[in-house]
Amino acid sequence: MTKEQFEREKDYRISKAVAKSILNQNIINNEDFRKINNLLIARYKPMIGSL
């Protein structure tokens, strides 16, 4: 894994964790979380995290 790939993976996982926290606080619902996750995958193109 290159440094760039690692950075994308890290940024994706951090962003997903924030979204998951917001979901757990019932600020967003599961459908919103799914949409956010799809946007994060499109933005960061993680190698491992999207599996």
Image (cartoon, grey):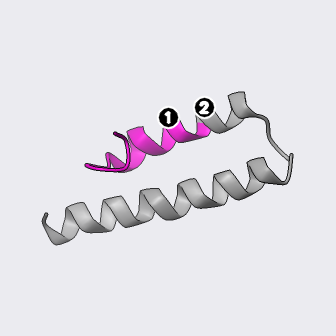
Amino acid tagged 1: Asn
Could you tell me residue 11's position as x and y percent? 43, 63
Asked if residue 45 lies left or right of residue 23, the reply is: left
Q: Residues within 10 Å of mark 2 (few under 14, many from 20)?
A: few
Discs 2, 1 touching: Cβ within 8 Å: yes
Q: Alpha carbon of mark 2 to alpha carbon of mark 1: how far? A: 5 Å
Q: For the residue labelled by badge 1, is the local secondary structure a helix, a strand or a loop? A: helix
Asked if residue 30 lies in the magenta stretch, the reply is no
Residue extending farthest bottom = 3
Seen in the picture, residue 36 relative to 6 is either above or below; the reply is: above
Residue 48 colored magenta?
A: yes
Highlighted range, magenta: 36-51
Check disc 1 and report the residue beneath it: 38
- Report which quarter residue 5 is drawn in: bottom left
For the point 13% across and 66% down, the residue is 2
Q: Kindly identify the residue that appears in the image at 34 percent across and 39 percent down.
A: 51
Vertical arrangement, residue 42 with respect to residue 1, above or below? above
Extreme residue toward the right, this view: 26
Q: Amino acid at mark 2?
A: Lys
Which residue is label 2 attached to?
A: 35
User: Most extreme residue toward the left, as rendered?
Assistant: 2
Q: Position of residue 41 (x, y in %)?
A: 41, 41
Q: Where is residue 30 drawn, in percent x and y?
A: 72, 33
Q: Residue at x 79, y 35 (%)?
A: 29
Q: Position of residue 6 (x, y in %)?
A: 26, 66
Which image quarter is the N terminus in? Answer: bottom left
Instruction: Say above or below: 39 vs 25.
Output: above
Query: Residue at image x 44%, y 56%?
Result: 12
Q: Is residue 28 left or right of residue 33?
A: right
Query: Residue 36 occupies which quadrant of the picture?
Result: top right
